[in-house]
Amino acid sequence: MAKQLGYTDDDLKALANFASAANFSPAVRAAIKLAENMTVNGQLVSDEDFAELRQYYSEPEIIELTSLIGMVNYFNRFTTTLRIDISGTDAPYESFVIDS
C-alpha cells in the first residue's frame, strides 16, 4: 500500500530510523512517532507528542490519525491471534514470538 501512495523502497527502509531520516517531512515523522508509540504502548504518547502533532495537524486530523492507527493495531492483533493469513499468497502462516 505504501508504494501505491508513492513511497519508495528507500522510504520503507528508512522507517527503522524515521526520527532522523530525511525521507520524511516533520509532519510525517510526528505521525509515524504517534503510530509507533501507540503500537508499543499507548501510554508512551506524551503531551509533548500531541503538541508536536498540533504543529502540523488539526484536532480532527489528529483524531483521524489516532483512530486509524488504533483500528490497524486491532486488525493486526485480531488476525495474528487467529492466525488469519492476509498475505494474499499460498505460503503457510508463519507465527513468531518476540523475546521479552
Image: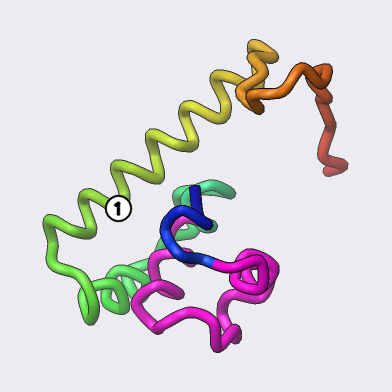
Residue at image position (61%, 23%) is 86
When the figure is inspected, residue 86 is found, relative to residue 14, above or below; the finding is above
* Quadrant in which the C terminus appears: top right
Q: Is residue 66 left or right of residue 14?
A: left
When the figure is inspected, residue 56 is found, relative to residue 20, above or below; the finding is above
Task: Please provide percent x and percent y for residue 32.
Answer: 47, 64
The residue carrying mark 1 is 65
Q: Is residue 26 left or right of residue 14?
A: left
Residue at image position (13%, 61%) is 59
When the figure is inspected, residue 82 is found, relative to residue 53, above or below; the finding is above
Residue at image position (53%, 47%) is 39
Question: Principal SS element in the magenta part?
Answer: helix
Residue range of the region highlighted in magenta in the rendering: 8-35
Picture quarter containing residue 50? bottom left
Task: Please provide percent x and percent y for residue 89.
Answer: 71, 23
Q: Name the one closer to the observer, 55 or 4.
A: 4
Q: Is residue 50 left or right of residue 86?
A: left
Instruction: Identify residue type, mark 1.
Output: Leu
When the figure is inspected, residue 52 is found, relative to residue 66, above or below; the finding is below
Task: Please provide percent x and percent y for residue 70.
Answer: 39, 39
Residue at image position (46%, 53%) is 4
User: Could you tell me which secondary element the residue under label 1 belongs to?
Assistant: helix
